[in-house]
Image: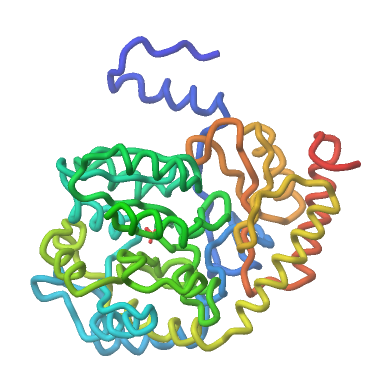
Amino acid sequence: MTPQPDSRGFENLALELEQRREQHLYRRRRLLQSPQQPRLRCDGRDLLAFCSNDYLGLANHPKVIESMQRAASRYGVGGGASHLVIGHSEPHHALEEALADFTGRERVLLFSSGYMANMGVITALLDKRDGVFQDRLNHASLIDGGLLCGARFQRYLHNDVDSLCSKLDASTAQRKLVVTDGIFSMDGDLAPLPALALACSQRNAWLMVDDAHGFGFLGASGGGCAEHFCMEQSQLPVLVGTLGKGFGTAGAFVAGSEALIETLIQHARSYIYTTSMPPAVAAATLDSLQLLKEEGWRRAQLAQLIARFREGAEALGLELMDSSTPIQPIVIGDARQAMAISEQLEATGILVTAIRPPTVPRGTARLRVTLSASHSDEDVDRLLEALSSSCKGRGLTDE
Ligand SMILES: *Cc1c(COP(=O)(O)O)cnc(C)c1O
């Protein structure tokens, strides 16, 4: 073993990296050499990939590409300034209005990324007089916003409404904000939003949902958790969506009341102190929103692929999580084993990412399979065959 560094000086950076490598936690980037799509080129090889969040296959859709090109010709490339200076352009405004209409909320505000939206909302709404209550499996951007805002930070047990209620009941905070992922990004399960909303309304708390993975997949028109559970603005006052997943573009939005959005414009530092997203990205998103709403066959195709995958994986005896969404993790447990299987899959031409601590709790390393409407039945069957041979002999399958 590499010796433990005995001080935290900068001279120990290389030593710390070496330790990380020994723990099988070292991360490296892959080089993508094609558009984001199931059959992609990566590090010089053609692979069949099950790891993007482009659930509907819109990231490389000809209509979306064309509208981005058209808007770039008309508005140029860079936003050029922050929204409050002179960076708020027509495509941004039109997209905000279209998203407000789509989500049935009074108003929407665009952010340059989901990370920034979550940081911005939580820090704009809360300070040290307040309390923030988060599911313990929430996305890092929500956790970071909660830590930064200065409010008392409490985590409740995953999807456990009783655990939340006991913390809310004991709290003397002025504002209480309950924050959850809609679909959990590493587990694929849904938050019990109606029960959470009821708990909030009985305790004078607000509910904030980050529905990064729900938009496009859940709801008859892709409206995400809010549409799936029929939740109005009064029950779900802070709704966050991201544009880099189901929408296939980039950026994020917050949907809610007039007062919420104006508060964010006045106080959300990650909104105020940054350049607006390129207007052409907003223009492209207007078209991807249209496709997302209207092409229901993409949701139907996804649902069909999810069922096919789960049935096949269960038949192999693999341990799946309680997920009905395009996020279908296979629990491996040990980080080294998860890496080894991921590498073996890749040797057969299939790309599935191994997710290790600290992204997931220790001892729950997993292969995170994600499905997209642009996968075919044959793609899923190829994945299942490869999983069958890679997991055999490791005590993970019924053999
Ligand atoms: C991806 C993700 C984000 C971050 O969104 P970006 O636009 O990629 O910054 C936030 N929350 C959740 C739950 C996510 O999965």
* 214 lies left or right of 154: right
For image coordinates 19% across by 55% down, the residue present is 125
- Who is closer to the viewer here, 45 or 182? 182
Q: Quadrant of the C terminus?
A: top right
For image coordinates 68% across by 47% down, the residue present is 330
* 124 lies left or right of 363: left
Q: Residue farthest to the front?
A: 202
Q: Position of residue 292 (x, y in %)?
A: 50, 81
Q: Position of residue 210 (x, y in %)?
A: 40, 59
Q: Is residue 338 above or below residue 382?
A: above
Q: Position of residue 9 (x, y in %)?
A: 28, 18
Q: Position of residue 102 (x, y in %)?
A: 39, 82
Q: Quadrant of the N terminus?
A: top right
Q: Which picture quadrant has residue 79?
A: bottom left
For image coordinates 75% across by 61% down, the residue present is 309
Q: Is residue 10 above or below residue 305?
A: above
- Who is closer to the viewer here, 299 or 345? 299
Q: How is the image coloured?
A: rainbow
Q: How many marks?
A: 0
Q: Quadrant of ligand 1?
A: bottom left
For image coordinates 49% across by 22% down, the residue present is 19
Q: Which picture quadrant has residue 70?
A: bottom left
* 331 lies left or right of 22: right
Q: Residue farthest to the left?
A: 85
